[in-house]
Image: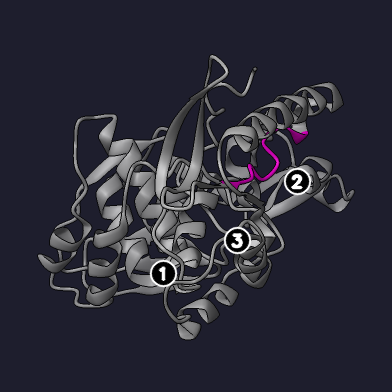
Amino acid sequence: MTAIPTPALLVSREQAFDVARLDRDGRLHRIRPGAYVEREAWRALRPWERYRLRVFAVARTWKSPVFCLESAAVLQGLPIFGEPTHVHLLSTGGRSWSEGDVIVHGHVDEKEVAYAAGMRVTALAETAVDLARVLTPAYALAVVDAVARMLRGRGEVLDISARGRAQANRRGVRQLDWLQERATPLSESVGESVSRAVIEWLGYETPTLQQVFTHEGVTDRSDFYWRRLRIIGESDGYGKYDADGPEAMKAHFVREKKREDRLRRHEGGFARWDWDDTVRFEPLDAKLRAAGLSPARGRQSLMLRTLARHPRSHPPRGKAESTKPGASG
């Protein structure tokens, strides 16, 4: 996806002209006291891009901030769901406090600090643990999978359960254990991670991830594969091509149609679903059944209800889905 360039921030204390006068003319949107952006540029941003700009504004108007939780995540390229309400900072003391849309979190555990986008943030593994404690399970799994992918690229392994249990903070330790059992760098997108949780809660067998096929001289790879029944599942890419123009979109869909037809000729059923199907879960269930799958155990209804606790109206930000090998064929 072609990213929308980050609009330029206008910070009052950094300008030689009267920013407030421009704001009275209605040309600017005030992000926070003393920080502005052109109104039209702000309107063009997606929710997670607005949030990232709000974090930038805090970085320019606060002294030596250290970002944590979603604010660290958005700078580190981790998934963000909708537009979070608050910007989160880390305090060196044990007391927490807030000012406007900024929450400063006191802590007693030692926190590893790193840099992202030129700003100080909690290190990747710290961000994963912090968000895993507070997000609902499927969305926490998307964050943890993303961190596991990034750390694997550095030759590191994430043990979120051990790291979390070593801290004095006991919040959500059972969820940390649940996530550790399921986290994998093989999930290549937010949609795949959330789909895995929903598939489990709907009662289906655990699929193989990133199964490779060679048919008709072409190598393809699927998001999910139920080997016993030879059924393929694909979690669609949530707008990966929509900003590249109609020709790119058309070429993508032609490639995908050829790939899907090839796999259908040589494998069993085929299910394809999108983000709304996943978080509403009944459409996903219907598509899996139509492909030839049947639940192997009962539903976990309480877990499925947790999907409603995060916004559905906007796809989450996350690492774009990889083009599957063979998709160009």
The answer, for residue 91, to whether it is visible in the render is: no
Horizontal and vertical percent position of residue 192: 50, 50
User: What label sits on residue 321 in the rendered view?
Assistant: none
Label 2 crowding class (10 Å Cα cut-off): few <14, some 14-19, many 20+?
A: some
**In the image, residue 111 above or below residue 247:** below
Q: Nearer the viewer, mark 1 or mark 2?
A: 1
SS category of the residue bearing label 2: helix
Quarter of the picture holding the N terminus:
top right
Q: Earlier in the sequence, mark 2 or mark 3?
A: 2
Q: Position of residue 280 (x, y in %)?
A: 65, 70
Asked if the residues shown at circle 1 and circle 2 are in contact, with their CB atoms under 8 angstroms apart, the answer is no
Q: What are the residue bounds of the magenta stretch?
A: 234-242
Sequence-first disc among 1 and 2: 2
Q: For the stretch drawn in magenta, what is the main secondary structure? A: loop
Q: Which mark is residue 288?
A: 3
Give the residue at mark 1.
137
Indicate the amino acid at tag 2. Trp
From the viewer's perspective, is the residue at label 3 or at label 1 nearer? 3
Would you name the residue on which mark 2 appears?
42
